[in-house]
Amino acid sequence: MVTESVLLVVQVVVSLFNIQLGNPVYQQYPMEKMEQCQFYADLMKGKDKLDIEYMLITQTKCVTTAEYKEMLAARASKEKPTNE
């Protein structure tokens, strides 16, 4: 499967007082076409009430496969220890 784009999804649970509970969940989904990526991004993003005091916030972003690989390379170069 040739992937043209990647759907990036971040999900966070927040309390009634807008305090983040726990760490965010990061997910990446390869997509064949950018239009397909945008379609699913629009379906997923938003705020969903879980309980009377908790809310799930989902943020999405579509990037090309080349942009995604650049992001990974930039993050890897930041995490690489320097030998001084």
Image (cartoon, helix red, strand yellow):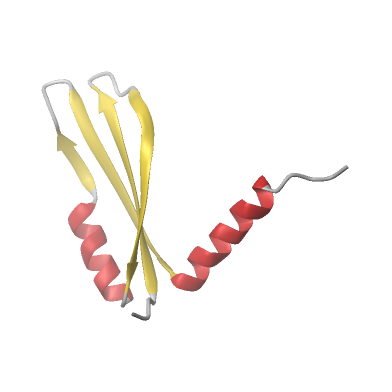
Q: Position of residue 74 (x, y in %)?
A: 62, 57
Tell me: residue 56, above or below residue 31. above
Where residue 10 appears, as percent x and y from the top left, is 35, 46
Q: Quadrant of residue 40?
A: bottom left
Judged left or right of residue 55, residue 1 is right
Query: Can you say which quadrant of the picture contains the N terminus?
Result: bottom left
Residue in the picture at 27% in, 74% down: 35
The quadrant the C terminus occupies is: top right
Query: In the image, 72: left or right of 22?
Result: right
Residue found at the very far bottom of the displayed protein: 2
| Total count of labels | 0
Residue at the limit of the structure toward the left, as seen here: 52
Q: Residue at x 35, y 26 (%)?
A: 20
Residue 30 image point, x, y percent:
35, 67
**Which residue occupies 68% across, 54% down?**
77
Does residue 46 appear left or right of residue 80 in this picture? left
Query: Seen in the image, is 35 located left or right of residue 79?
Result: left
Q: Nearer the viewer, residue 48 or 2?
A: 2
x, y percent for residue 82: 79, 45
Looking at the image, is 30 positioned above or below residue 83?
below
Residue 44 or residue 75, whichever sits in front: 75
